[in-house]
Image (cartoon, rainbow, N blue to C red):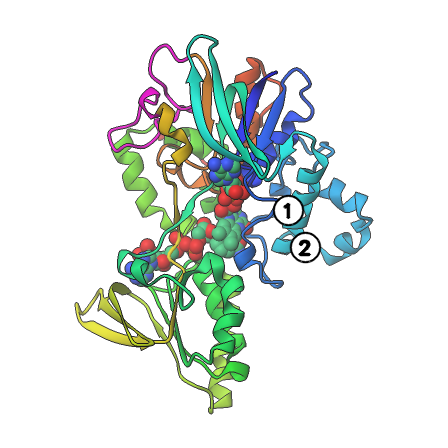
Amino acid sequence: MTYDIAAIGIGPMNLALAALADEVPELSIAAYDAKPVYDWHPGLMFDWAKLQVSFLADLVSLVRPTSRWSFLSYLAERDRMYPFYIAERFHIPRREYTEYCAWVADSLPSCHFGTEVAALDWDHNHRVWVLTLRTATGTRQTTARNVVLGVGTSPVVPEPLRPLLGARVYHSGEHLHRIDALAGDGVRHIVVVGSGQSGAEVFLDLIRQQREYRWALTWLTRTPSFAPLDYSKLVLEYTTPEYMRYFHSLDPDVRDRLIASQWQLYKGISTETIDEIHNELYEHMLDGNRPPVRLLPGTAVHNAAKEGDEIRLSCLHRDTGRTVTITADAVVAATGYAAVRPALLKPVEHLIAWDSQGRFDVMVNHQVRLVDGVTGGLYVQNAELHTHGAAAPDLGIAAYRSATILNSIAGREVFRLPKRTAFQSFEAV
Ligand SMILES: Cc1cc2nc3c(=O)[nH]c(=O)nc-3n(C[C@H](O)[C@H](O)[C@H](O)COP(=O)(O)OP(=O)(O)OC[C@H]3O[C@@H](n4cnc5c(N)ncnc54)[C@H](O)[C@@H]3O)c2cc1C
Ligand SMILES: NC(=O)c1ccc[n+]([C@@H]2O[C@H](COP(=O)([O-])OP(=O)(O)OC[C@H]3O[C@@H](n4cnc5c(N)ncnc54)[C@H](OP(=O)(O)O)[C@@H]3O)[C@@H](O)[C@H]2O)c1
């Protein structure tokens, strides 16, 4: 059969699509993920880590609070409503959010795991997308009239560190898979690079284990300060659908300038984590006999080399222009993620109308502009920071964006979308 929608990748964004589509019988959908089961950033799944958005930003509630796939529905099914009500917790543990998503993914017949989409092609004669699916048992093909790409972002490691990647130099996304081996290896000095939420959480994990493992720690970042995420109410309105529409209406060069200046909306540390780190530093000071801990803001790694077992980082200080050399046994690169062009698009790259910088040209309804003659719909989730702004990676937009895509594919307002989502008027009118 030819599906109305094939969703590629089942992270939170396409899972929201599958969950909302479950109540639209007129649209057939299949979603595929290469992973064997639903999982969400397992290498950073500290049991104490919290979601950065309210539980109301689950897969469906901001558009369809009555959905069977809401977080509250999950709690009811698990008989946890009273403990949750008494806990009064808006920011739920990350592991609880992941368990909720896994419950949805396991329950929806449209979600297929252990299935990598190896290639996407366009069949001109039948006017359908052709997906090549690779599973443990072999390769097969399926067809769809619309494709929604939700393949997430890829880890970024600074160029000088790339040749050193291995057991002792790794991206923060692998932290919990690697740290036990490092601890067993008796490392004496670990450097954490980067001061987004990942860097902060890795540093917090390492300083909490310092009494046991006696490692010295350096936490350095190119960002001018260990800056907080801006979570103030009127700034949060910059992650609403209303701002997203306004952002999309601007000239591309204005959008590029704005997104760079709005970094504290999506790159920074939660104030709660900053407080916890400060508490740990205070304990470190009181102990007095622990190995040193250094925090270096405004310091960028610009060269790296391995000498024997030692890693030598050459770092540039942004204010003084001075270079410092730091010697370490291990380096955790908490240096973020970026949208990359997925390899599966190779066969259809010539059918996509890329923008002047080789990025997707994404319309306001999240549909990618294609060359004339291709009638199938190609949509993206979380690959449109440059066209839709800081809301693109935010879980708080998942339900709204998925509903927008489903409305567009259905050709009617299947989901009534909230009209007023911010108090501010972003245009001077
Ligand atoms: C540790 C961490 C915590 C975060 N917490 C928050 C938070 O609290 N609030 C917030 O707003 N944002 C948060 N974010 C940011 C963002 O919401 C997440 O990165 C989120 O996972 C993005 O969802 P996604 O569906 O776009 O991508 P992903 O979750 O990365 O999912 C993409 C999926 O696509 C699959 N895939 C890729 N290629 C293929 C292919 N060819 N075939 C089949 N499957 C494929 C992958 O296996 C993966 O499962 C967090 C980010 C990180 C790193
Ligand atoms: N608890 C949670 O919910 C949670 C946990 C983890 C992540 N997240 C989210 O996931 C997204 C990614 O976060 P992230 O922390 O992985 O990445 P990030 O926010 O992009 O932070 C990357 C950090 O690395 C720095 N950096 C990059 N290259 C460097 C170099 N060569 N030398 C020194 N520093 C360098 C960056 O500095 P510049 O500022 O100069 O670029 C920045 O401080 C964010 O939206 C975040 O909020 C959420």
> What residue is disc 1 on?
55
The circle on residue 42 is none
The residue indicated by pointer 2 is 89
| Residue 94, quarter of picture | bottom right
Disc 2 residue type (three-letter): Arg
Are the two marked residues, 2 and 1, in contact with CB atoms closer than 8 angstroms?
yes
Q: In screen coordinates, is 70 left or right of 210?
A: right
Between 4 and 17, the residue placed more toward the observer is 4
Tell me if mark 2 has few (under 14), some (14-19) or many (20+) residues whose alpha carbon lies within 10 angstroms of its own.
Answer: few
Q: Where is residue 335 in the image (x, y as percent from the top left)?
A: 37, 57
Q: Crowding near pointer 1: few (<14 within 10 Å), some, many (20+)?
A: many
Q: Nearer the viewer, residue 19 or 246?
A: 19
C-alpha separation, residue under disc 2 versus residue under disc 1: 8 Å
| Residue that protrudes farthest toward the front in the picture | 137
- Could you say where residue 226 lies in the image, as x and y percent from the top left? 38, 64
**In which quarter of the view is residue 406 placed?**
top right
Which secondary structure is most common in the magenta stretch? Answer: loop
Figure quadrant of residue 340: top left
Q: Which residue is drawn at 36% across and 49% down?
A: 263
Residue 252, percent across and down?
28, 31
Between 90 and 175, the residue placed more toward the observer is 175
Q: Quadrant of the N terminus?
A: top right
Indicate whether 238 appears above or below 43. Answer: above
Above or below — where is 30 with respect to 99?
above
Determine whether the residue tagged by mark 1 lies in a helix, strand or loop. helix
Residue at 73 percent across and 32 percent down: it is 66
> Would you say residue 365 sits in the magenta stretch?
yes
Q: What stretch is highlighted in magenta?
A: 349-374
Q: What residue type is labelled 1?
A: Phe
Residue 69: x percent and y percent?
A: 70, 36
Q: Can residue 151 be seen in this view?
A: no
Please report the residue visible at 67 percent of the width from the left and 44 percent of the height from the top. Answer: 102
